[in-house]
């Protein structure tokens, strides 16, 4: 058994982290890539550093196993030189169907996909298009009442004392409130509902290659703008038995949007997936986990079950923070320390669990394939690692409207224009809405704040690679 213990002083990045909490007001969507990255650089930290005692800056962790071909930790840093991307193992033939989904419709030909037929990438889609009008009608036809809460303002929990205090809103970001509609863990003990968000992107193929070798399947929460840029990657993910689900068009915090803007974000990403795969996903993950009863109701009305990640207390959320290595806000050592805490907590739970990880950046893929997944695979007793739909003990076909077994897995809402039973969002645990943990939960505030900024930076770099 391989045993690895590492530690690193990380003064500057921790200082940046501390400075970014509470989150400042809305990051300007117009900020250039340069200034977005610059704001995360420790240039202005001198005064703060000298005013504070040196923070506890050591992150230790131990791993049961690592990948012999892993990138060294010293290379999994912000600004690392680009490492090689694996070509896709194969490209799907138009008309193909995944062997794991009986009766799946034939795969569309990606050459027929016309990027000009979609909204501009990585920007909130307009709400006056015929498509959005149609999806608004779908929501209206669902019979589901959309609560009239005002959108929150950018800046997370500290910037929104009213919504935080209003338990009836059930805002997960600030306090961890969930409803029966939400998937936050897997039912069976020692079962990990594996997920990666924000792709498909350049390094997704490296992750797919590892998953394939390890015979692992995942759920991918994909961004519509990335789907248009990487349709062949998405097709391979789907054809090789991974689950595909919605993660919006341009990755905004959804509670800050109007109803129509939420509908446009979900609708365009659902449509992009349908156009590339021929099937319509029925699960979604809100960017940053930012969901309240208004966002829930709209998601459910569009036939999309919200999937979050496991949260057992304000300080134990199953977020590796891998997203923030690329932006220099978290170190790989910190991420692996978080991972060790997650494993420690997961093995004490009497249910399974879901962890937040990403495939958008080289760094998060390298920490997954080099360290987190090899460690998880070596864990004793063994984890069962599978897509969210599988961990819910449902067949893969149940993840899509067209192949869902409607008799055994009734659709959650009025998706696909069907008026079905009115779904109640009634809370399973209203007590979990208590704002007590919320105000002091700086963790959610911190992770909420820098991420949109980092995403803007990332999105700016991701040029359309449709070919
Ligand atoms: C659970 O996670 C928390 C922090 O997220 C950590 O302090 C604690 O040690 C973990 N528990 C176990 C049993 O590993
Ligand atoms: C389930 O219902 C949807 C929407 O009406 C339909 O498209 C799909 O074919 C149905 N599933 C099956 C297996 O018939
Ligand atoms: C992704 O790869 C393409 C070429 O394969 C390259 O042009 C592009 O810059 C890459 N994007 C990022 C964000 O690395
Ligand atoms: Zn995301």
Image (cartoon, rainbow, N blue to C red):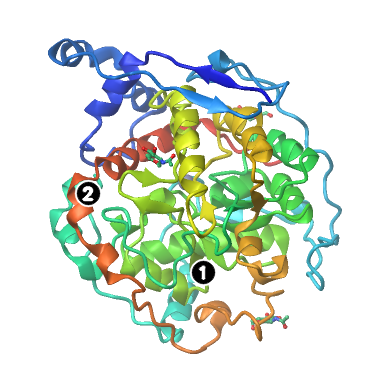
Q: Check the image and report above or below for 362 versus 273.
A: above
Camera-nearest residue between 144 and 128: 144
Task: Please provide percent x and percent y for residue 330.
Answer: 41, 27
Camera-nearest residue between 211 and 56: 56
Q: In the rendered image, which quarter contains the N terminus?
A: top right
Task: Please provide percent x and percent y for residue 15.
Answer: 27, 20
Residue 170 in sight: no
Residue 228 in sight: yes
The residue at the point 45 percent across, 16 percent down is 7
Q: Which mark is residue 157?
A: 2
Task: Please provide percent x and percent y for residue 138.
Answer: 48, 79
Q: Check the image and report above or below for 291 versus 362.
A: below
Where disc 1 sits, the SS reads: loop
Camera-nearest residue between 379 and 254: 379
Q: Quadrant of residue 329?
A: top left
How dense is the environment of label 1, judged by Cα within 10 Å: few (below 14), some, or many (20 and up)?
Answer: many
Mark 1 and mark 2 lie on one chain; the one further toward the N terminus is 2
Where disc 2 sits, the SS reads: helix
Q: Check the image and report above or below for 289 versus 147.
A: above
The residue at the point 37 percent across, 62 percent down is 261
Q: For the residue with label 2, is its CB less than 8 Å from the closest atom of ligand 1? A: no
Residue hosting label 1 = 304
Residue 88 lies left or right of residue 35; in this view the side is right
Task: Please provide percent x and percent y for residue 419.
Answer: 51, 88
Q: In the rendered image, which quarter contains the C terminus?
A: top right
């Amino acid at each position: 058994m391989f045993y690895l213990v590492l530690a690193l002083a990380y003064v500057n990045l921790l200082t940046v982290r501390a400075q970014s909490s509470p989150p400042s007001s809305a990051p300007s969507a117009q900020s250039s890539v340069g200034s977005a990255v610059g704001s995360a650089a420790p240039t202005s930290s001198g005064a703060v550093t000298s005013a504070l005692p040196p923070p506890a800056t050591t992150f230790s962790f131990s791993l049961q196993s690592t990948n012999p071909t892993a990138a060294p930790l010293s290379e999994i840093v912000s600004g690392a030189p680009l490492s090689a991307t694996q070509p896709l193992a194969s490209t799907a033939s138009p008309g193909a169907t995944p062997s794991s989904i009986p009766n799946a419709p034939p795969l569309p030909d990606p050459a027929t996909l016309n990027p000009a037929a979609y909204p501009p990438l990585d920007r909130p889609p307009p709400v006056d298009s015929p498509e959005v009008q149609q999806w608004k009608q779908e929501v209206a036809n669902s019979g589901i009442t959309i609560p009239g809460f005002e959108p929150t303002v950018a800046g997370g929990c500290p910037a929104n004392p009213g919504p935080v205090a209003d338990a009836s809103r059930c805002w997960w970001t600030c306090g961890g409130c969930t409803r029966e509609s939400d998937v936050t863990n897997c039912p069976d003990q020692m079962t990990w509902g594996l997920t990666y968000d924000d792709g498909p992107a350049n390094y997704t193929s490296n992750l797919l290659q590892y998953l394939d070798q390890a015979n692992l399947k995942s759920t991918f929460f994909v961004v519509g703008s990335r789907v248009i840029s990487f349709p062949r990657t998405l097709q391979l993910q789907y054809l090789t038995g991974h689950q595909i689900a919605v993660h919006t068009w341009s990755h905004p915090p959804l509670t800050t949007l109007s109803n129509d803007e939420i509908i446009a974000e979900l609708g365009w990403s659902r449509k992009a997936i349908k156009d590339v795969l021929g099937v319509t996903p029925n699960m979604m993950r809100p960017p940053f986990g930012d969901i309240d009863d208004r966002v829930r109701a709209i998601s459910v009305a569009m036939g999309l079950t919200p999937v979050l990640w496991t949260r057992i207390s304000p300080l134990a959320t199953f977020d590796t923070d891998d997203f923030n290595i690329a932006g220099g806000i978290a170190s790989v050592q910190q991420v692996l320390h978080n991972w060790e805490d997650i494993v420690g907590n997961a093995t004490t739970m009497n249910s399974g669990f879901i962890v937040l990880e990403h495939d958008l950046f080289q760094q998060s893929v390298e920490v997954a394939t080099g360290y987190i997944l090899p460690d998880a695979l070596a864990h004793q007793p063994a984890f069962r690692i599978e897509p969210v739909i599988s961990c819910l003990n449902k067949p893969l076909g149940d993840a899509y409207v067209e192949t869902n077994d409607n008799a055994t897995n009734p659709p959650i809402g009025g998706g696909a224009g069907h008026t079905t039973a009115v779904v109640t969002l009634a809370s399973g645990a209203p007590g979990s809405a208590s704002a007590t943990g919320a105000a002091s939960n700086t963790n959610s505030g911190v992770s909420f704040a820098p991420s949109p900024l980092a995403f803007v930076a990332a999105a700016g770099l991701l040029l359309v690679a449709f070919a």
